[in-house]
Amino acid sequence: MLYFSGFKEDGEKMFDCERCEKKLWTSYHKLPDGTVVCNDCYSIYLMQILDKINDTKAYDITYNFVKKYQGKFPSDLIQELVRLLEFRYNITVDVVALSEILHIIRDKIEKEEAIKKLALFERELKKDSSIVNFCEICNVRLPKSEFDYSMEHFGKPLCMVHQKEKRASSHALKVYDALKKRGIDCELEPYTVHKHVDISIKNAKLNIGIDGEHHSLDPEQLHLDLISDENSLKEGFATKHYTLRDIDDNLEGIAETLAKVVQQRIKKSQKDEISASKETKHNLSNTHKKRDK
């Protein structure tokens, strides 16, 4: 909420920003914990809350709320959303701040939709079967179906790899980039038979999950995660989970450890395949011998 600061009779300020110590000559905001901050620090606070929402499943809920009410957000439902974010996703925010965040998301949605419409308009103007399209990041040639999907969903030509990077969370991207730098062949945001995975290392039969705190604190979510991990195990894949805080505190150490474990698992997988192949040949040989008799 925006407040206007008062002045003493001698003209001295009554408040300083408690984060950057900027002089608050005209207006200030109060955070939920009572901290008095300037406009700039309040904007940073809003972005921090938005990052927390983006890094958890709470983004889908918040995004759907914005889409449903189109900027006319009922105050009683905003209060309910505040409670939902706190108790289910461990995100603390007050009604005023959340209202501003909802409008930020609404502006982003409107901008994305405008970009898509302009991209489609431009595509119609350029429609020509002889046109060749390339990913704007890596310059790889795009099949028409891949180009059309990218323009419809992202408003720009992107290959499948960079489409996935656009969808991935910031923490998943950090781990993905750190593994790639260490020569690990991994896939970002793949979909298996049973579920969506943050990062998959197929040649090591290892999935990486990067979760918000609610994955450990919400019984229903934990139950679903356990079922998901069991299904992955049936497919031959082990699953290692990290929290957002783990990634923030020790990204390089985690990536280094994973790189070593991946090499060990690849070697074991190769040995298992050789053993299985030998056993198959042995069984076939015995079968032929029995037939010959």
Image (cartoon, helix red, strand yellow):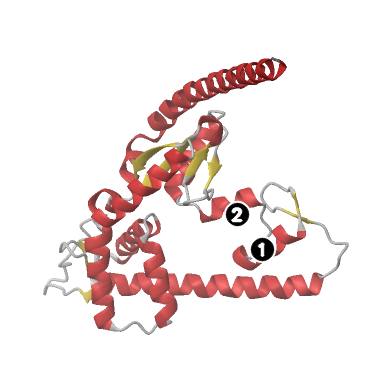
Taking the view exactly as shown, the residue that stands out farthest to the front is: 293
Seen in the picture, residue 273 relative to 243 is either above or below; the reply is above
Quadrant (top left, top right, bottom left, bottom right) of the N terminus:
bottom left
Q: Quadrant of residue 78?
A: bottom left
Residue drawn at (53%, 21%) of the image: 272
Q: Circle 1 — which element?
A: helix
- The image quadrant where one finds the C terminus is top right
| Cβ–Cβ under 8 Å for marks 2 and 1 | yes
Q: Amino acid at mark 1?
A: Tyr
Q: Label 2 sits on what residue type?
A: Gln
Is residue 217 found left or right of 283 in the rendered image? left
Residue 205 locus on image (x, y percent): 50, 33
Residue 25 in view of the camera: no
Q: Nearer the viewer, residue 229 or 240?
A: 229
Vertical side of 72 occupied by 139: above or below: above
How many tags in the picture? 2
Residue under pointer 2: 163
Q: Position of residue 262 (x, y in %)?
A: 48, 27
Q: Which mark is residue 149?
A: 1
Of the image marks 2 and 1, the number of the one nearer the N terminus: 1
Kindly identify the residue that appears in the image at 60 percent across and 63 percent down: 154
Residue 191 to residue 202: above or below? below
